[in-house]
Every structure is written in C-alpha cells, then in structure tokens.
Image (cartoon, rainbow, N blue to C red):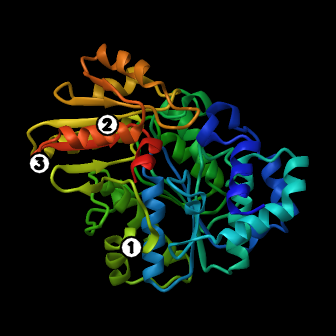
Amino acid sequence: MNYQETTNWMFNQLPMYQLQGASAYKKDLTNAYLLVKHLGNPQDKLKCIHVAGTNGKGSTSHMLASILQEAGYKVGLYTSPHLKDFRERIKINGKDIPEEFVTDFINEHKNFFESNDMSFFEMTVGLAFDYFAKEKVDIAIIEVGMGGRLDATNIITPLVSVITNIGLDHTQFLGNTLDAIAFEKAGIVKPNIPVIIGEYTHDTQPVFLDKAKECNSEIYFAADLISETYPSDLIGDYQIHNKKTVLQTITVLKSQNDFKITRKNIKSGLLNVVKNTGLQGRWQQLREFPKVICDTAHNKNGLEIVLKQIQKEGFNTLHIVLGVVNDKDLDEILPLFPKKAIYYFCKPNIPRGLDAEILRQKAATFDLKGEVYNSVSEAYQKSIENAAKTDFVYIGGSTFVVAEIL
C-alpha cells in the first residue's frame, strides 16, 4: 500500500474516534500492552512527559516541545487529533513522520493488527513509540488521547506527568462530574513520578491529592506556584494557564533529571511554538481586514474563554462560522454564544458532524440567528463576502470545522 492507501485503511478498517465517536472508544489497556510487546516495548527506551487534561493539553505539549528543542534536544511529539494530515500526530523537532515510515510500519504489522482487532488509536500510539525509539529521541512529549487511566498512551512511565485542567467533556466515557473526570485523568499518575496540575477546583484538587499520596508522587499546583510568565506566539487568553503549567513542568524536569534548559531557551521556546512545532488552530489569525480568527475550542470551558476574548476585540459586526459534532451538548455550549452576531451554520465533513439544519434550529431557541450552508468552506466564503473590513469573523465549534478552512 502507498501512503494514501495506508492511511485510508487505518481510518476505514478500524474504529477511529475522530470519525466515529463512541463506537471507537476502548475501555481497556490489554491491546495496548499486547501491541507494544509485539513491537519489542519501544516505550521502555523513551524518556517521556505525559500530558492529560480537558483543555490545553495540545498547546501545553507543543510549548514543552518547543522549549526543549530550543535547548538543543531531539524531541518527539505525539498529539491528536490531526487537522490536515495524519502525520501531524507524530513529529520530531517539528517535522512530521515520513510517509515511508508510516507505510512500512503498517505493511509490516498489518496481519497482527487485523488478527488482534487493534483500534486506529492503538496502532497510532504503537507507531509513535516505535518511530521515537528508532530515531533515538532525547525526550518524547506524549499527549493523552482521551481521559488518561484507560488511554492507550498510559503504558509509559514518564519522567513527569502533567494534567492541565478538568472540564465536562466526553462525559459519556469519563463520567459526568468533575471529580469523576479528574479520577480518569489522574490515572496517568505513576508511583514515585512527580505530577504537575495546571488548574484545579475544590472538586478536583482532593482527587489529585489522593492519587499523588497513593502513588507517593510529589504534586505541584502550577497556578499557585508560578506568578510570572513570558510572552508567547500562542496569544489566546487561555494560554496564560498553559504557560504556567509549562514553566512548572520545566522547573521539575530540570531539578529531577539531567536536562539543561536556560531561561533564554524558555523565552525563545514560548515565542516560537508555531515555527518550532507547526501547531495550528489556536486563536490563529487568517486575515487582517476583516480580522479572521479560527480556534479549535469545542467544549464549555474552552469556548467560554475564546468567546470572552472575541468581545475584547474592536469590530462593527461579528460573523460566526459554526459547526459541531453530533455528540456535543448544545444546551451547554450554545448559551455561551453572543446573540448579537450573524451565524453561518455548517456541518464538518465527517460522519460525526451534526447536520447544519439541526444546529440552526437548536441555535434559534437561544436567539442565535443565521443561515445554513452546504459546507464549511461555503459558510466561510459567505462570511468573508458579507464582512466589512471593520468586522470580525470567527470560525469554530469543532476541531474539524477549523481543519477544513486551514
């Protein structure tokens, strides 16, 4: 199989949460352990930072990678989902995994994957560990896919564990209370391995403290420990919390391991995240007149911050290109959106995409008014046609909406 055939096979033959949602979720690590044993346990050859959290784990992972790259290290970065190309998920020093490595890996192990019913995510995790081990990275940043305790990445013993924050997302898998979700995320905490918590609440802090005590792990609450941060090219308001988490993580990494990271490396790393890692879709400006911003925020906690930031902008009319996936709790997120805006409703082009007419009807009950469009690109083009130079256009609601206009 060539690269296109290989990725099509990966997407279509086996459950993929990005496309199918609930049916792709596995509540078990048996397959993950079986896979890495088959691959010769590449994860045991890696030094890792493990990053979980409801929001911010992608930005946090990319910031950490950028700083470590600035310090001269060969850095593996595993994140999900991808926006345009599957290879975005697996990078070394900002460069995507080669197509040839992906195809060779799948072709070599395809029979094993099929006979053991490996999920898309399990295969991808195995591919990342195998690639990073063969390329002898100095350190790998491993972002959790969903949750933590039962995520396929949770077979590593990292140098440090990081939990950015806890919000109500993926509740059908992780529980519908903050403490239940915190318990799942805290599942990445390992015995005697330090853990950094980005943000916490009175519901989640006791869960983290209990888990750290059970594991005899030192615990650091970044929000309480870091008072000063540095500028970053990631300028979303929510990045202040992520920067504190990153700075505390670097402090612990330096104190407990043999990593040499200077203040200059930290400052430069934070200022050059996009250049060093290729991160996209975080308060990303696409045009100036009218100002066009896209952002992958897609749950209540993330959208609250982004929508508040929009209100700080100076504009005449606000245009919002909006699409969501079909398992989104609309009663939770639609009340966050401003009534004083023109909406362009669309469906992201994946099986999980919610029909744009259903979204329009539901939005109307919250007095959010606009038209339905046949595609994300059509909705985006219409918003640009309608917007004056002094207007503001926001594209969001789903990672997959953003992916279609980048």
Q: Which numbered dot is residue 389?
A: 3
The mark that comes first in sequence, 1 or 3, is: 1
Instruction: Please tell me whether mark 1 or mark 3 is closer to you in this view.
Output: 3
User: Which quadrant of the rendered structure holds the C terminus?
Assistant: bottom left
SS at badge 3: loop
**Nearer mark to the viewer, of 1 and 2:** 2
Task: Say the numbered circle drawn on residue 295.
Answer: none
Tell me the amino acid under the disc marked 2.
Val
- Are the residues flagged by discs 1 and 2 in contact, CB closer than 8 Å? no
In the figure, is residue 226 to the left or right of 14? left
Rate crowding at label 1 as few (under 14), some (14 to 19) or many (20 or more) other CA atoms within 10 Å.
Answer: few
Location of residue 374 (image quadrant) = top left
**Where does residue 239 sit, x and y in percent of width and height?**
32, 56
Is 209 situated above or below 39?
A: above
Q: Is residue 19 left or right of residue 320?
A: right
In the displayed structure, 56 sits above or below 19; it is: below
Q: Residue 352's image quarter?
A: top right
SS class, disc 2: strand
Secondary structure found at label 1: helix
Residue situated in front as seen by the camera: 213 or 339: 339
Residue 396 image point, x, y percent:
36, 41
Q: How far separated are the C-alphas under marks 1 and 2?
A: 27 Å
Residue tagged by mark 2?
321
Q: Quadrant of the N terminus?
A: bottom right
Give me the C-alpha separation between circle 1 and circle 3: 28 Å
What is the three-letter code of the residue carrying label 3? Lys
Which residue is at 36% across, 54% downward? 282
Give amino acid for label 1: Lys
Point out residue 163 in the picture as x, y percentages from the top left corner.
50, 52
* Residue designated by label 1: 275
